[in-house]
Amino acid sequence: MSDQNLNTLEQIQTQLYQLQLQQGIQERVLGCLLRGLARHPDVIDDVENEFHALADAMKQTNPELLDVVLPYIERLTKRE
């Protein structure tokens, strides 16, 4: 493998790692927010309805993303 290809591969791996870290942080922040909102059932119900409206809209525009979005929404809206 040439040095340029190796360098490009390393850059892609670094970017992927950073995206994975960013996603993990975002999920934790959203989880904290939703747990805080869970103390207010009317608000958390509205948030959950918005998530499901988002999923319904995605069904129309990007149905291929539903396999990723639905489990993500379920994980975020899981009530303890």
Image (cartoon, grey):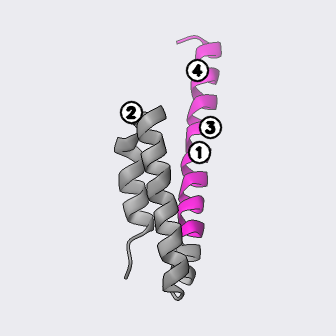
* Residue 64: mark: 2
- In this view, the residue farthest toward the bottom is 39
* Residue 6: mark: 4
Amino acid tagged 2 = Glu
Cα gap from disc 1 to disc 4, whole angstroms:
20 Å
Query: Which residue in the structure is indicated by mark 3?
Result: 15
- Label 1 or label 4, whichever lies nearer to me, is 1
Is 62 contained in the magenta span?
no
Cα gap from disc 3 to disc 1, whole angstroms:
6 Å
* Residue 55: mark: none
Whether label 3 touches label 1, CB < 8 Å: yes
Which comes sooner in the sequence, label 4 or label 3? 4
Q: Nearer the viewer, residue 25 or 10?
A: 25
- In this view, the residue farthest toward the top is 2
Query: Which residue in the structure is indicated by mark 1?
Result: 19
Callout 1 crowding tier (Cα within 10 Å): few <14, some 14–19, many ≥20: few
Q: Main secondary structure of the magenta part?
A: helix
Cα gap from disc 1 to disc 2, whole angstroms:
20 Å
Cα gap from disc 4 to disc 2, whole angstroms:
32 Å
Amino acid tagged 4 = Leu
Callout 4 crowding tier (Cα within 10 Å): few <14, some 14–19, many ≥20: few
Give the image location of residue 77, x and y in percent. Answer: 43, 69
- Label 4 or label 3, whichever lies nearer to me, is 3
Cα gap from disc 3 to disc 2, whole angstroms:
24 Å
Q: Which residues are magenta?
A: 1-30
